[in-house]
Amino acid sequence: MLALAVTQTWAFDSSHALWNKTLKRHVKDGLVDYKGLKRNSIDLEIYLKSISQSPRSEFDLWSSDEQLAFLINLYNAATIQLIVDAYPVKSIKDIGFLPHAAWRQKRIHLWEEKISLNHLEHDIILPGTRHLPAVHFALVCAAKGCPQLRSEAYTGSLLKTQLEDQGQLFLGNTSKNRISKLEQILYLSPIFEWYAEDFERVSGSVKNYLTKHAAHIFQTDLSRYKIHYTRYDWSLNVSEE
């Protein structure tokens, strides 16, 4: 990690240009060039530094879509920085000595506090998005089992379209979600199990959510199908070197 001057100030750019530049340069098809990013992560560092200096009062003036885009970008950028600092690693779960240590480390500077990825996700992002389960298709924990990391930053003006696209990419990815008409079984990502309440809250059930948002993918009546949740792939979402 390159050392940034402690007293240096960086104005936050609500277009997320530096994060967007980082993603376009180092992410392809959801996989990250961590080796290249470790060699030059200055844009990522400045982006996170600018967030740390962005006051809560400014955040409160934004639209709800701008706020959510900001928080999703922060979660994903902080996760990538965590991996870059520890790289080479085979999985985010290999970071730290205790179980789930990567998510518990207070590394994120936000609104004059140091918080963890867990706190950002479960105490800041999710409480305000219980009506929007598609947010689970945007938060990326640096594992291949996660939804695909976009090669662009989320923005308030494009957020709804971006989340819809993320959902379609995730639901249509047969390595994560597939149907066996012979067995009449839906093999689904554990994300639908971990956050079942969020999908049930808006659609009544996970299967109802899939029927509404992925009927063109599964192309059958899902009511008679059993659900089998697959094993999550925690291997690093790293591009081939």
Image: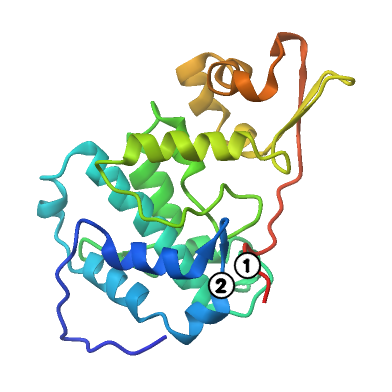
Q: Which residue lies under the disc numbered 2?
A: 33
The N terminus is located in which quarter? bottom left
Q: Secondary structure at mark 2?
A: loop
Residue 221 percent location from the top left of the image: 70, 10
**Residue 16 sits above or below residue 43 on the image:** above
Q: Amino acid at mark 1?
A: Val
Q: Is residue 152 or residue 227 the one in the foreground?
A: 152
Q: Is residue 106 visible?
A: no
212 left or right, relative to 24: right
12 left or right, relative to 232: left
Q: Which residue lies under the disc numbered 1?
A: 238
Q: CA distance from mark 1 to mark 2?
A: 6 Å
* Occupied quadrant, residue 169: top right
**Residue 155 sits above or below residue 101 on the image:** above
176 left or right, relative to 96: right
In terms of sequence position, does the residue under pointer 1 or pointer 2 come before the other?
Answer: 2
Q: Is residue 147 visible?
A: yes
- Asked if labels 2 and 1 touch by Cβ distance under 8 angstroms, the answer is yes
Residue 9 percent location from the top left of the image: 14, 78
Residue 52 percent location from the top left of the image: 24, 68
Q: Amino acid at mark 2?
A: Asp
The residue positioned 25% from the left and 43% from the top of the image is 156
The residue positioned 66% from the left and 40% from the top of the image is 173
* Occupied quadrant, residue 50: bottom left
The C terminus is located in which quarter? bottom right
